[in-house]
Amino acid sequence: MKVKEAQREVSRFGALYIVEARFRNMFKWRSAIITAAILNPVLYLLSVGVGIGSLVNAKQGAGGVDGVQYLTFLAPALLASAAIQGAIDEVTFPTLQGFKWAKNFFAMNSTPITGNQIALGVYIAALGRTFVTVVIYWLILLIAGALPTGTAWLAMFVAMLAGGAFGSIMLYLTSKVEKEDFFLTAIGRLIIMPLFLFSGTFYPLSSMPLILQPIGWISPLWHATELGRYLTYGHSISGLMIGVHFIFLTSLLALGLKLAFRNFTKRLSK
């Protein structure tokens, strides 16, 4: 292949080359990735779904929470949470490495690969890893009997949408980091943990004080959880709110990618 032809190919398929590089890196850690994808849902189901769930079911009686057993109520939120966490991990660390630790994004950008392609490649690879996590998590929930309806498989796509939405925003925010310092700690403690606790994960959002409910309204996790509960056990939700949830998640995904593309290009041009 001639040099110019090779350059044109790299320029055309730059994002796919980044995806390939990320997948090769993930493959080195395949045992850890798969082990974590299996152990996390199992431990959550045993400790929260079964352990705490038995106490909740005993107190709530036959009606359970939202008309179902606690594990069934909890399952869609856990699935969406796993997708979000997986996407965050796979966009945050590679982006910090690319811009700060190894600075390999600058080497990539010295080829015909553009900043947009680098950002898109990292993002697609993150979704690939997230998909594996979501499928394994969903299968374990199915085996545990937490997904009673025939439409429950669609909850995987909702979880992926939530992971994609949160992941795109994190891709942008991480690309803005000049000095990481306490960045990861702050994100975990000030954003991820509050959203996990106040997004209707463990109890209906309506049961929270009104002053705290807006945290859930702006949380991708809450929107995905509501859709997931509708799909997995028929949670009551209006057609209007189904549209609102989808529009919120897709809009957040598109906004995050647009900002990330812009900032990757800007930062790599310095």
Image (tube, helix red, strand yellow):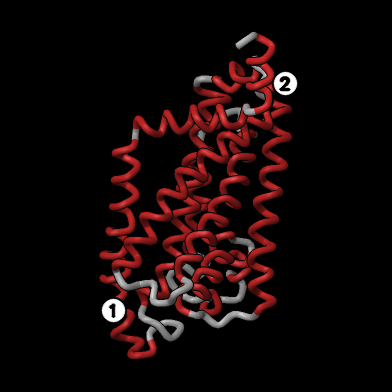
The residue beneath circle 1 is 55
Q: Which mark is residue 140?
A: none
Q: Residue at x 65, y 9 (%)?
A: 3
Q: Position of residue 167 (x, y in %)?
A: 56, 46
Asked if residue 180 can be seen in this view, the reply is no
Q: Residue at x 71, y 28 (%)?
A: 265
Mark 1–mark 2 Cα distance, whole angstroms, equals 57 Å
Relative horizontal placement of residue 245, taking residue 234 as reference (left or right): right
Q: Of 30 and 257, which appears nearest the observer?
A: 30
Q: What kind of residue is marked 1?
A: Leu
Outermost residue, top side: 3
Crowding at dot 2, Cα within 10 Å, few <14 / some 14-19 / many 20+, comes out as: few
Q: Quadrant of the N terminus?
A: top right
Which picture quadrant has residue 118?
A: top right
Instruction: State how many labels appear.
Output: 2
Q: Residue at x 50, y 30 (%)?
A: 20
Q: What kind of residue is marked 2?
A: Ser
Of the two numbered discs 1 and 2 on the same chain, state the one appearing first in sequence: 1
Q: Identify the element where label 1 is drawn.
A: helix
Asked if residue 57 can be seen in this view, the reply is yes
Q: Of 95 and 108, which appears nearest the observer?
A: 108
Crowding at dot 1, Cα within 10 Å, few <14 / some 14-19 / many 20+, comes out as: some
Outermost residue, front side: 1
Q: Identify the element where label 2 is drawn.
A: loop
Q: Is residue 128 above or below residue 114?
A: below
Outermost residue, bottom side: 62
Q: Position of residue 254 (x, y in %)?
A: 69, 49
Q: Residue at x 70, y 36 (%)?
A: 261
The residue beneath circle 2 is 269
Relative horizontal placement of residue 35, taking residue 9 as reference (left or right): left
